[in-house]
Image (cartoon, coloured by chain):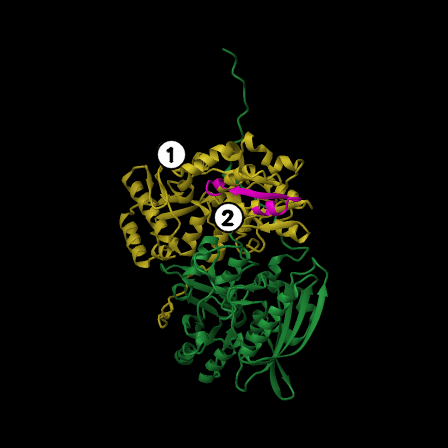
Amino acid sequence: MKYIEEFQDPELARRLLDDIHATVTRPWALMEVCGGQTHTIIRHGIDQLLPDQVELIHGPGCPVCVTPLEVIDKALEIASRPEVIFCSFGDMLRVPGTGRDLFRVRAEGGDVRVVYSPLDALRIAQQNPTRQVVFFGIGFETTAPPNAMTVHQARKLGIRNFSLLVSHVRVPPAIEAIMQSPSCRVQGFLAAGHVCSVMGVAEYPVLAERHRVPIVVTGFEPLDILEGVRRAVRQLERGIHTVENAYPRAVRPEGNPAALAMLEDVFEVTDRAWRGIGTIPGSGWRLSERYREFDAEQRFSVTGIQTREPAACRAGEVLQGLLKPHECEAFGTTCTPRNPLGATMVSSEGACAAYYLYRRLETPPAAPAHLEASPVA
Amino acid sequence: MPEPIDILPAPRPDLTAWTCPVPLRDQPRVVTGHGGGGAMTAELVSEVFAPAFGGELLGRLGDSAVLSLGGARLAFTTDSYVVRPLFFPGGSIGDLAVNGTVNDLAMSGARATYLSCGFILEEGLEMSVLGRVAEALGAAARVAGVEVATGDTKVVEAGHGDGIFINTAGIGLVPAGVDLRPQRVVPGDVVIVSGAIGLHGVAILSVREGLEFGVQIESDCAPLGGLVDAMLAVTPDLHVLRDPTRGGLAAALNEIAAAAGVGVVIQERSVPVPPPVAGACAMLGLDPMYVANEGKLVAFVPREHAEAVLAAMRAHPLGADAVVIGEAVETHPGMVVARTGLGGTRVVDLPIGEQLPRIC
């Protein structure tokens, strides 16, 4: 915790902000790829403190948002079966499929459990040999290695009643798709530090070069974000575009070899649909042939799923920086976390949810000059 | 050379055409969020219970009702306890069943005098477990200075309960001159919290989910009647007290802001979050402001009394770490706003249901 405090130090933040203010001479649009970074930015009010010329665009890096509706519906179908114990990370329970979510399945009698690690799901499988235990394996490069390792363990331990409903996605192909979009305004990227801690940075130089954008590997604490912005702006002002690692305490250029080996063993790259935006080539993982027996989709023959997306909201424009969440007519009125119109409002890491939670106040209140809060005990 | 096979290109990803899920505008069944102490719980009360029951007192929706009976003003409340596991670091369901109800009364300024106690037991529960819970409940009542005056026992079939559910109701006298309710809050009132937040929720999480956070975190479960007495001894003119249980400090502040029609501004760095709680919450993606407490209170105090009240709180063992965290303001009525450590602002909203640990 000491380290978290240090990376929120207001005095160091002030120095970084001063440096950014002194460096910027023109407008720049940067995209933070990861939803966790979006929340840090909004939660700490970092965007309010940056120069007006630095615009942060909130990328599609929210695993909950981008999981395709078809996969959610398959999860709901599997979780409804009486022989199944369906295990998931908590924040997937609220994401609506076609007319239902996992909370509702549980209220209807489904055995849906929140776990904190895929290994917990494996333990549940060991403890319930007569039931089928399914883990909902979604997320980016960060969650893929532990999920791969769990499948590897399941085979090693001979646990036959465990399977993975897998819908993993990869960041670099998403960056490529964003840059190819005709309406793209992004001029630089804050790459997601935890993704790079697994994968390394090998995939980024070609992207930086091809699209002439700086890519700065960035962490998740306020000082990390400010340092990422500072470096990206510095490159843009100088007219250069390279890959920089501003998160060296967690990221080595080669990534994590053990995690990479596990991914290589258990998964294979596949085309993957992203909710709402369609298929991005090579942007996902599925279980490799050797581990296909642990694929929940095959085990439960979930076919004939008819998905039904509702009327479109404007999340696509939000995710490209064409629209700020609060500029959408539905924002905060017909669309709230309680009654979301879009995935970006549903997920706790979605850009709209972040704005709703932290930024509904149009005019920040004046500082209460006569009140000095007493120090932390 | 064979002719190249003509492959249809995959449709190009279209980021502007991002479409989104059907909103779940209503829940045809009860879900866990309805008991989370946030917006869903409030909806359940305002849309189902209050219209069905009617009555003016329930409409006030306080933690306890203040009734006039035979010339006396009585505070009256009830609560049910469904915690799992039954024993946790710093307490048990027996301690909670006493302290939770005693504290609801204390938030009206009343010292709890009598409790009722209803047990719903699951068939198959070990008698020794029931004995330990009963002992803990009795001991907590003695510490709180309250007598269990009446009770009830029911047994449900195996598989229809969670070992033990306990309901307690409590009653106590409200001293003359004491009138604690959100409607009395005015801009300029100082917001004080009695100590470190988030301990109970994280302690329960650590044992229920088998999570280890480096150090053992103990629940803050404690009776607050004595602390409230010490505060009222300084001035009976406290405006409102609230114990931030389910939904945490954020829910308590939002409820007061909404009912009082004032804004609340808090200084985020002044909110006392112990490092182990902050670390556990950072790991799980939870916000300590929304985590439950069982032995803390938040007070809105007229500015002129704030210093004396704070000193009195700090002189009491359960208020030793009391701090000012903010104030009531005229702007943004009904809304709670935090000033962040870096100098930005953010809205601290009422939680919807329960907080959910995030994926990564």
The Cα–Cα distance between marks 2 and 1, rounded to whole angstroms, is: 25 Å
Relative side of A13 to A80, left or right: left
Q: Looking at the picture, does residue B147 appear above or below residue A223?
A: below
Chain letter belonging to callout 2: B
Shade representing chain A: yellow
In the rendered structure, find residue A142 and report the number of the disc placed on it: none
Give the SS element for disc 1: loop
In the image, what residue occupies the spot 44% across and 74% down?
B319
Task: Give neighbour class at mark 1: few <14, some 14-19, many 20+ (Cα, 10 Å).
Answer: few
Relative side of B105 to A234, left or right: right
In the rendered structure, find residue B359 and report the number of the disc placed on it: 2
In the image, the segment drawn in magenta is: A123-145
Reading the image, the residue beneath label 1 is A202
Give the SS element for disc 2: loop
| Of A302 and B180, the residue lying toward us | A302
Chain coloured green here: B
Q: Amino acid at mark 1?
A: Ala
